[in-house]
């Protein structure tokens, strides 16, 4: 059975969270001439400008189709660097240098409705891919439309902060989908994916009425306030008749023109009290966070229906075993896309992860699967026989569960990450009657001990180190060494220690620090112990 290096496209998901915050600021008077004038604030890459232009045109069409085109002119500044973004904030929005520095550190865009000005931060994580640039552009322009519809009351402290920001993200997702970026469906699933991984979030009631100072605080990513606002809007639009969702949001901002009370405007627009909605949202949110794992398997052309059905069956079958191993179950909806072969794998990554063909090719190299939030793309041509599928699906689901438990990781221990999900894959094989775990263990122990040369475990702490070792020593020995090291650790400390390790990773944010805390030694000390164990048992 072949073991392939597995890669997760966690970078894209992290980038979307890292600087997804935007903010609206109002003063002075907007331009009187309708339309969006896009102005580069520096040497902006051509692809970035093209995406911003397409998104602005897409937004204008969406607003016109909804019967509410922008009534005032907007100048949209596109800054390619953080320094130039800060310069726009000081020169165009009259912020002090200190204020501009704080804003640029946490925002992907800034809008002044009365000024008729919007700025985009090209250095922000949300501006690093095509889909992100489109959704961020539309997000900021919808703030301008909110200003029009509400006659400037949308940012009042009495208005509903969550609906202001969440609806802007919703419109951003609509425009991105319309322009060929990520789908609205993916935006909805990724929102809940991010919230399930969040160590903590603000309470929904904290996102109702906010002062300007509090709004700035809520932009910090540790609060996950924008993702929670998005979830509230997702819940809200699901209550609307299909095809009327955007119209209902527009009615809310129009109602704000006659009253500064967000609650009163909400009742007029949605036919229910805001208090009632908060209660219903809380129930919905608890259910969504704990929704049992569900895989929507999508077979691309060239992938048989039988293979797709088997993957779905194996993904469901492994869940009870993983819940027992990790102490909690995998939750949420995932799209599992099966690509037919290596070329189709690259194409599927480009289409579903909103990256260039070159980036897709880079990500696909040496990988069996790629993860982008709630979307997993698998090279089905590498799944081989039923035994390989059981192992691969077991390892994949273990990776998803570990991501849910441990959230963001720094100071990686890559050999342990890979070794443990491979052990989970072996457990899945044993559960399916495809051999005994003890026999598999004996196989990789013998391979590692008989190998003339193996990399040091310390060389395998990072993904780059794993790749370099694979190039020098071969994939098989690197994978077997990772399995050997992880199994030795579990033999000595028990599987419950790994659950404790993941919880410490979640708390501390560092895999190596968590390793020291749980196992009482650093990774270098364990590497020496493992080498002694390997060489003394030949």
Image (cartoon, rainbow, N blue to C red):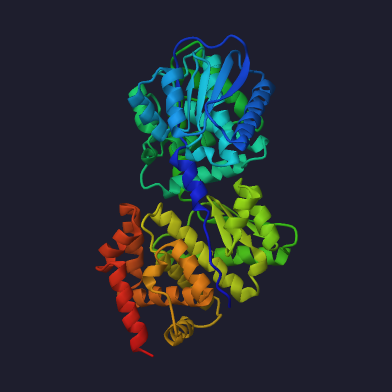
The answer to which quarter of the image holds residue 326 is bottom left
The answer, for residue 448, to whether it is visible in the render is: yes
Query: Where does the image place residue 121, in percent across and percent down from the top left?
Result: 49, 32
Give the residue drawn at x 30%, y 78%.
529
Residue 210 vs residue 9: left or right? left
Q: Nearer the viewer, residue 32 or 433?
A: 32
In the image, farthest residue toward the bottom: 538
457 above or below 149?
below
The answer to which quarter of the image holds residue 223 is top left
Picture quarter with the N terminus? bottom right
Picture quarter with the C terminus? bottom left
Give the residue drawn at x 50%, y 55%.
292
Query: Where does the image place residue 9, in percent across and percent down from the top left?
Result: 53, 53
In the image, farthest residue toward the left: 520
Give the residue drawn at x 66%, y 48%.
351
381 above or below 77?
below
Q: Nearer the viewer, residue 181 or 246?
A: 181
Give the residue drawn at x 52%, y 76%.
476
Q: Nearer the viewer, residue 260 or 140?
A: 140
The answer, for residue 162, to whether it is visible in the render is: no
In the image, farthest residue toward the front: 43
Tally the marks.
0
The answer to which quarter of the image holds residue 240 is top right
Query: Where does the image place residue 399, in percent across and percent down from the top left?
Result: 48, 61
108 above or below 469?
above
């Amino acid at each position: 059975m072949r073991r392939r290096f597995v890669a997760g496209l966690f970078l894209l998901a992290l980038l979307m969270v890292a600087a997804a915050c935007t903010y609206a600021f109002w003063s002075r008077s907007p331009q009187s001439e309708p339309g969006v004038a896009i102005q580069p604030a520096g040497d902006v890459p051509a692809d970035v400008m093209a995406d911003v232009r397409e998104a602005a045109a897409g937004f204008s069409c969406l607003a016109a189709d909804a019967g509410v085109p922008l009534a005032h002119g907007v100048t949209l500044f596109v800054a390619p660097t953080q320094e130039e973004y800060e310069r726009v904030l000081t020169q165009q929005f009259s912020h002090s240098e200190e204020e501009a520095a704080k804003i640029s550190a946490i925002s992907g865009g800034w809008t002044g409705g009365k000024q008729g000005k919007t700025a985009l931060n090209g250095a922000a994580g949300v501006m690093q891919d095509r889909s992100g640039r489109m959704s961020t552009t539309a997000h900021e322009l919808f703030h301008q439309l909110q200003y029009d519809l509400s006659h400037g009351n949308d940012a009042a402290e009495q208005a509903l902060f969550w609906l202001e920001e969440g609806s802007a993200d919703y419109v951003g997702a609509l425009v991105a989908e319309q322009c060929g970026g990520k789908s609205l469906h993916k935006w909805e699933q990724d929102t809940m994916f991010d919230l399930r991984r969040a160590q903590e979030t603000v309470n929904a009631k904290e996102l109702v009425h906010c002062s300007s100072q509090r709004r700035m605080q809520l932009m910090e990513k540790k609060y996950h306030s924008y993702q929670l606002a998005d979830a509230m809007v997702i819940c809200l639009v699901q209550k609307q008749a299909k095809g009327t969702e955007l119209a209902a949001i527009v009615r809310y901002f129009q109602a704000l023109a006659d009253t500064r009370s967000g609650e009163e405007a909400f009742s007029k627009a949605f036919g229910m009290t805001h208090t009632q909605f908060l209660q219903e949202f809380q129930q919905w949110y608890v259910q969504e966070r704990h929704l049992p794992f569900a895989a929507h398997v999508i077979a691309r052309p060239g992938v048989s229906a039988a293979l797709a059905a088997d993957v779905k069956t194996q993904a469901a079958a492994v869940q009870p075993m993983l819940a027992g191993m990790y102490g909690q179950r995998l939750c949420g909806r995932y799209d599992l896309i099966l690509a037919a072969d290596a070329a189709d794998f690259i194409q599927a990554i480009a289409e579903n992860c909103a990256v260039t063909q070159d980036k897709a090719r880079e990500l696909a190299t040496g990988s069996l699967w790629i993860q982008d939030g709630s979307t997993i793309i698998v090279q089905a041509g590498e799944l081989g026989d039923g035994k390989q599928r059981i192992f691969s699906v077991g390892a994949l689901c273990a990776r998803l569960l570990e991501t849910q438990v441990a959230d963001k990781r720094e100071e990686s221990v890559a050999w342990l990450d890979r070794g443990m999900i491979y052990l989970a894959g072996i457990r899945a094989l044993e559960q399916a009657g495809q051999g005994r775990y003890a026999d598999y263990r004996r196989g990789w122990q013998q391979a590692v001990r008989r190998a003339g040369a193996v990399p040091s475990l310390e060389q395998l702490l990072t993904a780059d180190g794993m790749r370099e070792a694979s190039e020098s020593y071969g994939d098989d020995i690197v994978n077997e060494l990772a399995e050997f090291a992880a199994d030795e650790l579990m033999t000595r400390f028990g599987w419950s220690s790994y659950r404790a390790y993941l919880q410490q990773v979640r708390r501390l944010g560092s895999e190596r620090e968590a390793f020291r805390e749980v196992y009482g030694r650093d990774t270098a000390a364990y590497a020496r112990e493992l080498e002694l164990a390997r060489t003394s048992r030949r």
